[in-house]
Image: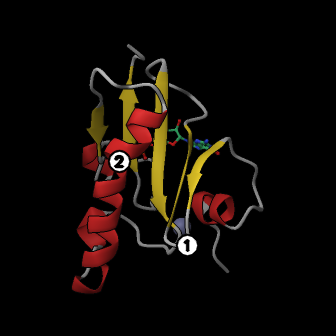
Amino acid sequence: MNNCIFCKIAAGEIPSAKVYEDSDMLCFKDINPAAPVHLLLIPKIHFDSLAHAQAEHQTLLGKMMLKVPQIAAEAGLSNGFKTLINTGKGGGQEVFHLHIHIMGTPA
Ligand code: 5GP
Ligand code: ZN
């Protein structure tokens, strides 16, 4: 039984404010934003963190990284944005399904 909250969001079992979705990934608004725009980009498949990524995830991770600036631009972050990947408890990770934070202030 997968009790991961982001898997449930990816499956549509828990609602989220989606801003982008394709067959590989989903992007939605962070429920507790730390910036005027604060999005989370997740893979639809589960792996716990960047430290758990395997060679088989290389293409997926590349697709996600290339999608980040497109999502940021569509969110109005034309002046730039911050990305953050917390990894492990010592890295401040609280949800153990890999996610990329995308944060910024619309220009
Ligand atoms: P982490 O510290 O693991 O890198 O970040 C987890 C992020 O997920 C936090 O910024 C938190 O606000 C966000 N978050 C946790 N639960 C939910 C949820 O159910 N829905 C949404 N949209 N964001 C969540
Ligand atoms: Zn998950």
Is residue 42 rendered to the left or right of residue 15?
A: left
Is residue 107 rendered to the left or right of residue 17?
A: left
What type is the residue that disc 1 sits on? Ser
Where is residue 65 drawn, in percent x and y?
28, 56
- Quadrant of the drawing holding the N terminus: bottom right
Question: Looking at the image, what colour scheme do you see?
Answer: secondary structure
**Label 1 residue SS:** loop
Where is residue 95 drawn, in percent x and y?
48, 52
Q: Residue furthest bottom?
A: 56
| Mark 2 lies on residue | 68
Is residue 58 rendered to the left or right of residue 106?
A: left
> Residue 26, relative to residue 7: is it above or below?
above
Q: Residue furthest top?
A: 107
Where is residue 30 drawn, in percent x and y?
55, 36
Question: Ligand 2 sits in which quadrant?
Answer: bottom right
**Dividing the picture into quarters, in which one does residue 105 lie?**
top left
What type is the residue that disc 2 sits on? Val
Q: Residue at x 47, y 45 (%)?
A: 40
Where is residue 33 drawn, in percent x and y?
52, 25
Q: Nearer the viewer, residue 91 or 39?
A: 39
Alpha carbon of mark 2 to alpha carbon of mark 1: how far?
16 Å
Q: Nearer the viewer, residue 36 or 71?
A: 71
Q: Residue at x 76, y 49 (%)?
A: 15
Q: Residue at x 53, y 69 (%)?
A: 44
Residue 23 image label: 1
- Quadrant of the drawing holding the C terminus: top left
